Image (cartoon, helix red, strand yellow):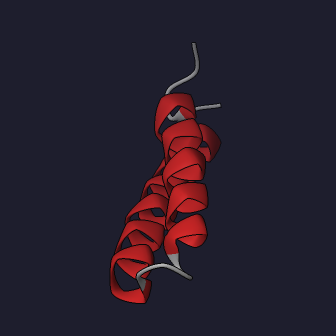
């Protein structure tokens, strides 16, 4: 399995969860969304770096 794939997939799932929570509780939703986007970016950097 390629390095960075797991964080990228995890980041996508967490960012989607955060986006879904924005209407119920915006503060928590934005926090979770940011956490997921950070994982997504770091996973993408690993995928590009370790081709």
Quadrant in which the C terminus is drawn = top right
Say if residue 35 shows up in the picture.
yes
Q: Is residue 36 above or below residue 3?
A: below
Name the outermost residue toward the top. 1
Q: Position of residue 50 (x, y in %)?
A: 56, 33
Residue located 53% across and 57% down the image: 17
| Residue nearer the viewer, 47 or 14 | 14
Residue located 44% across and 54% down the image: 39
Say if residue 45 shows up in the picture.
no
Q: Position of residue 14 (x, y in %)?
A: 49, 52
Q: Position of residue 13 (x, y in %)?
A: 56, 46
Q: Position of residue 34 (x, y in %)?
A: 43, 73
**Image quadrant in which you'd find residue 27:** bottom left
| Residue nearer the viewer, 2 or 22 | 22
Residue located 51% across and 65% down the image: 37
| Residue nearer the viewer, 28 or 10 | 28
Number of marks? 0
Name the outermost residue toward the front. 24
Q: Is residue 51 above or below residue 34?
A: above
Residue located 44% across and 87% down the image: 26
């Amino acid at each position: 399995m390629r390095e960075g794939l797991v964080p990228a997939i995890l980041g996508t799932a967490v960012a989607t969860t955060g986006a879904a929570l924005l209407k119920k509780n915006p503060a928590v939703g934005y926090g979770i969304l940011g956490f997921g986007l950070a994982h997504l970016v770091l996973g993408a950097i690993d995928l590009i770096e370790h081709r």
